[in-house]
Image (cartoon, helix red, strand yellow):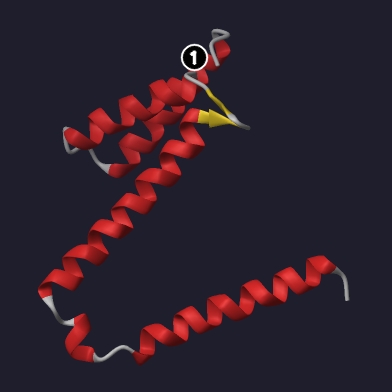
Amino acid sequence: MSLAWVAVLASATIAFLLKLSGHALPRRLLDDRRVREVLAAVTIALLAALVAVQTLTTGTSLVLDARTVALVVAAVLLWRRAPFIVVVIAGAVVAAVLRALGWG
């Protein structure tokens, strides 16, 4: 068995055990208001970190390009409570126009 398959099986086992551990937690712990608030904050923080890494980096370098401007436009539209489809389309259009103009 190659090292890649060992890594895949180990990752799958760890993921399964993490899921299983969630079912083993006592219900009273999950019903606690503070725990729910922390879990909600962790979810938002992870999503924000993923968006930041995918938007602001290429390889190992920091990049400010059309993706950054599109993200700012999308954030402003979300802040103004625009419908989600409008946010997605506006971000895509801004990125496409800037790339067509040669920036990013």
Quadrant in the picture for residue 16: bottom right
**Picture quadrant where residue 90 is located:** top left
Relative to the observer, which residue lies in front, 38 or 55?
38
The residue depicted at 77 percent of the width and 73 percent of the height is 6
Image quarter where the C terminus lies is: top right
State which quarter of the image contains the N terminus: bottom right
Q: Position of residue 74 (x, y in %)?
A: 32, 31
Q: Report the residue at 63% width, 76% height from top.
A: 12
**Percent position (x, y) of residue 83?**
25, 41
Q: Residue at x 16, y 32 (%)?
A: 80
| Residue 23 in the image: above or below residue 74 | below
- In the image, is 35 to the left or to the right of 33? right
Residue farthest to the top? 101
Label 1 neighbourhood size at 10 Å, few (<14), some (14-19), many (20+)?
some
Judged from the image, the secondary structure of the residue bearing numbered disc 1 is helix
Residue 5 vs 65, above or below: the answer is below
Please name the residue shown 34% across and 41% down the image. Answer: 85
Please identify the residue farthest to the left as the structure is shown: 33
In this picture, is 98 found above or below 61?
above
Compared across the picture, whether 82 is left or right of 49 comes to left
List x then y, in percent, for residue 65. Answer: 49, 18
Q: Is residue 76 left or right of residue 69?
A: left
Disc 1 target residue: 98
Tell me which amino acid carries mark 1.
Leu
Q: Position of residue 36 (x, y in %)?
A: 19, 70
